[in-house]
Structure formats: structure tokens, C-alpha cells
Amino acid sequence: MNIKQSFFTTLILTAFILPAHAEDPINTTRDVLYQWVETKQIFSEETSDWQLEKSILQDTEVLLSKELARMNAAIDDLEASATAADADRTTLTEEKEKQIAASAVVKANIGALEEKVKAIVKTLPGPLVDKIKPLIRRLPNDSTNTKLSLGERVQNVVGILSQADKFNSTITLSNESREISDDKVVQVTTLYWGLAEAYFVDNSGSYAGVGKPGTDAWEWTQMNEVGPAIKQLLDIYEGTGEIQFVKIPASIQ
């Protein structure tokens, strides 16, 4: 039963009861009416408050749902980042272990490499030795007792071998002084055919010869009879002579 029906029921009962028990039915009816109005106002206010609270709760639910979704996405991103970081950490650890193992191998063999390089330097031609002198000076006298770091020692060895390989893959022209006899030194032009062989001749073509690497140094053999041919070869190399086949002595080791 709603409030309106209750009010009319109250009025009917009042109509039958008041004549026997009340002297002023109008005042009584007025009081009942006031109570009914007051009750309706309270009900209306409660209904309005509930609607407002319901709207607030619904908005709050939407906001909390969005915040929950954002937090779940953030957690997923953190988990993905953590997984990627673990993978990177594992990779870096493996690389570090490989580098440590490689460094141990290099450290155990660098001394022997330096000694081999010192032996190789003795067989290198003068122009190449002049170019790599700064690196040669840095080779330790005692490979077992040096203040150079492992990286510096490796850099020296690699630098010398790299320059030697570069020289070996090119033809090099050099102006040098060559001892022809015990008391005679002449200015010659030398053409190095990599590290395999070299030919020298003076400006007149009178003094000439062939050079090749020896055990401790380059060995030079005077062959004045091939001076004109070597002079012709140099002219072709420098672009001042006609290109043609030139017959000169050569040896295969």
C-alpha cells in the first residue's frame, strides 16, 4: 500500500471514529494531513538523495573501471619490460663470459705473438719499418714483465701486422741510398713488389739490382746488366714510359 492510499484510509477511519472520541475533527484531520505531507516530503527527499547517490556510484564505478584497466595495462607493460630486461641481462652475461674467455686466451698467447712479430720486423723492408717504428718501439723488451695493458699490447701487434699486410698488397716506390761497394753509396729508386721482391736503379741506369727478404734483413744483389730494364719498368710505373712487357729477373720462394 502506498502513502496516498494510506492517507485516504486514515481519513475514512477518522471520519467514523472522530464523532465518538473527538470534539474537533477538523483539527484532527488537519494534523493527519500535515503528517501525510511531511511523510511525502521525507519520501521525496530520500528518493532524490538515492538518485543522486546512485548517479555518483555509477560515475565512480566507471572511473574505477578505467583506472583498473590502466593499472592492468601498466602491469602488463612492466612484466613485458622485466622479461625483456631479463633476456638482455642473460645475453650480456653470456657475451661477458665469452669476452673473459677470449681475453684469457689472448693473455696466455700475447707474449709469444710479440716475439714472433719482433722476428718478422727484421725481415720487413726499410720503408715499411720507418712507417711502423712507433708501434715497434712499444713492443715490450720482456713480454713477461710489462706495464702495458692487454689491449695496448694487442693493438701494437695488430697494427704492425695490418701495415705489413697493406704493404704486401701494393707496389711501393721509394728513394733510398744503396751501398754499391765498400766505399761507394749511390742514390737509387727502389720499386717494392709487396714483400716478395724489389728492384733498384740509379738515375743513369748504371747501377741496379734486385732485393728479396732474408732471414734477418733484406738481401740485395747488384745486377748492373739489368739496369736499363729496371729503369724502363720504373718509367712505366711512373707513367713516363710506353706500356709494354719488360723482362727482369724474378725468383719464386
Image (spheres, helix red, strand yellow):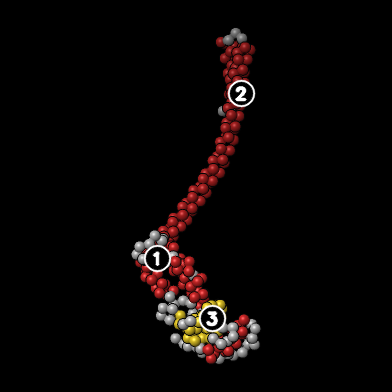
Point out residue 217 in the picture as x, y percentages from the top left corner.
Answer: 44, 78
Point out residue 124 in the picture as x, y percentages from the top left corner.
Answer: 46, 76
Q: Earlier in the sequence, mark 1 or mark 3?
A: 1
C-alpha span from label 2 to label 3:
129 Å
Q: Is residue 97 left or right of residue 11?
A: left
Disc 1 residue type? Pro
Against 190, residue 75 (above or below) is above
Q: Earlier in the sequence, mark 2 or mark 1?
A: 2
Helix, strand or loop at disc 3?
strand
Against 19, residue 155 (above or below) is below
Residue pointed to by mark 1: 140
User: Foreground residue, 217 or 19?
Assistant: 217
Badge 2: residue crowd in 10 Å (few <14, some 14–19, many ≥20): few
Against 251, residue 90 (above or below) is above
User: Foreground residue, 36 or 114?
Assistant: 114
Mark number for residue 41?
Answer: 2
**Quarter in which the C terminus is drawn:** bottom left
C-alpha span from label 1 to label 3:
36 Å
Disc 2 residue type? Gln
What residue appears at the point 35 percent right and 62 percent down from the top-left corner? 145
User: Foreground residue, 175 or 191?
Assistant: 175
Q: Quadrant of residue 99?
A: bottom left
What residue appears at the point 59 percent right and 18 percent down from the top-left corner? 35
What residue appears at the point 61 percent right and 17 percent down from the top-left corner? 34
User: Foreground residue, 41 or 164?
Assistant: 164
Residue pointed to by mark 3: 186
Q: Is residue 153 visible?
A: yes
Disc 3 residue type? Val
Label 2 vs label 3, nearer the camera: 3
Label 2 vs label 1, nearer the camera: 1
Q: Is residue 105 visible?
A: no
